[in-house]
Amino acid sequence: MPKPQPSKQFHVLCHEHHIEMRLTDVLIKTKGPPTQTLAYACPVTDCTVHYTVSSGYLIDGNNGHVEGDMTPRVICPRDGRRMYLAEINPEKRAFRLWRCPQCDSSRTNEEGLVTEFP
């Protein structure tokens, strides 16, 4: 399972507050035993939004159990990874730019997949 590497940091925005999330070590409880993993966490007090490269956006619910029903699920059409919110435009409130953590492709809600070449 890929994990964020210090050499490749992503600029993940919280889908609730639209501010950059911080990479941190978190304990995630899913159906199996709790797992310690690197995840992006919203810095806003009491916000429980997290993002992991392997699972996408997660919300830490009651007793540390992860909930996923109300989280964005934007999938990269190239590799199937869960994309992260990378940019918003305050002047165009509905605009969202999503980026893939694996292939670095991006897409917006206004257009399809945008391929970026270095």
Image (cartoon, grey):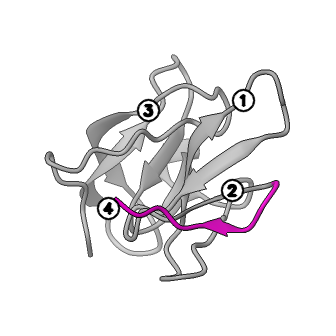
Query: Relative to 97, does residue 116 appear above or below in the rendering?
Result: below
- Report the span colored magenta: 110-118
Marks 2 and 4, the one that precedes in the sequence: 4
Number of the label disc, if any, that sits on residue 36: none
Q: Amino acid at mark 4?
A: Pro
Label 4 sits on a secondary structure element that is loop
Which-is-in-front pick, marks 1 and 2?
A: 1
Q: Quadrant of the N terminus?
A: bottom left
- C-beta proximity under 8 Å, tags 1 and 3: no
Label 1 secondary element: loop
Q: Is residue 114 magenta?
A: yes
Q: Secondary structure at mark 2?
A: loop
Quickly name the residue at label 2: 72
Q: Position of residue 88 (x, y in %)?
A: 67, 34
* C-alpha separation, residue under disc 1 versus residue under disc 2: 18 Å
How far apart are the alpha carbons under marks 4 and 1?
Answer: 37 Å
Disc 3 on helix, strand or loop? Answer: loop
At 55% from the left and 25% from the top, the residue drawn is 19
Residue at 14% over, 48% down: 7
Residue that extends furthest to the top in the rendered view of this protein? 45
Q: Which residue is mark 1?
A: 89
Q: Amino acid at mark 1?
A: Asn
Residue 65 position in % (x across, y down) = 50, 54
Is the stretch drawn in magenta largely helix, strand or loop? loop
Q: Are marks 3 and 4 in contact (CB under 8 Å)?
A: no
Residue under numbered circle 3: 21
Of badges 1 and 3, nearer the viewer stands 1
Q: Which of the marked residues, 4 or 1, is nearer the chain's N terminus?
A: 4
Residue lying farthest front? 118
